[in-house]
Image: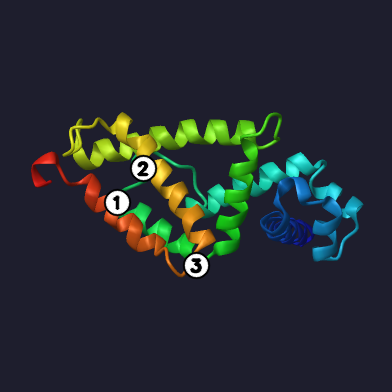
Amino acid sequence: MARARSEERRAEILRAAVEVIAERGYRGASLGAVAERVGLTQQGVLHYFPTKEALLVAVLEERDRWDTGGGPRSADAWRLDLLASLVDYNAMRPGIVQTFSALLGESVTDEHPAREFFTRRYVQVREDMAAMLRAEFGPRLPSGLTPEQAAPLLTAVMDGLQFQWLLDPASVDMPAAFRSFVTLLGTGPEAS
């Protein structure tokens, strides 16, 4: 019972951290603001996450768990249609997308505590995307690109669409735009 309550409290803190980071960015977020949202003291938050950086990493890891359904990513787990479903899902949770985007943007600055996480994550994401594209198209996409050449582009489109959608959701239909890109991936130069 105590363990379940502890896990529930930890999840509450993570949700609050997502909200605070979405509103203020990582540098503007404080443990005190997170604590206030869940009705704890700052020391109470530190009981679950010993540093602000530890809370940040937990937020990022939790976001990845949400995106992968709770399990570890495997190269054969992703398909383009499942990726499109993930984009649909992200369109229903702007706070998570905003938090991820704010942290991603901030992480490119020197000595940001999320920099190492995102660097490792993007290596893994590019590998996963290349494996997915290889399973979908073989050693070459219809355009002639290899899966390794197309993987960073696919990743950039997904992240770029999130930024555009956050800035102007009325004008950018993120799921439709992503499906258009998937169609483009399957179109060779002969169709141009």
Q: Amino acid at mark 1?
A: Phe
Compare marks 1 and 2 and give the one earlier in the sequence. Answer: 2
Residue at 32% in and 30% down: 148
Q: Residue furthest bottom?
A: 170
Quarter where residue 150 is shown: top left
Question: Amino acid under label 2?
Answer: Leu
Q: Left or right: 77 with respect to 55? A: left
Where does label 3 land, which residue?
A: 92
Q: Are marks 1 and 2 in contact (CB under 8 Å)?
A: yes
Q: CA distance from mark 1 to mark 2?
A: 8 Å
When asked about the image quadrant of residue 4, the answer is bottom right
Question: Which residue: 76% across, 45% down?
Answer: 27
Q: Nearer the viewer, mark 1 or mark 3?
A: 1
**Image quarter of residue 105:** top right
Report the side of 65 relative to 114 (left or right). Answer: left
Residue 8: x %, y % from top left = 72, 61
Q: Identify which amino acid the numbered label 3 is placed on.
A: Met
In this picture, residue 116 sits left or right of residue 54: left
| Other-residue count near label 3 (Cα within 10 Å), few / some / many at <14 / 14–19 / ≥20 | few
Rendered image: mark on residue 181: 1
**Which percent across, then down, holds residue 71?**
49, 47
Quarter the N terminus occupies? bottom right
Label 2 vs 3, first from the N-terminus: 3
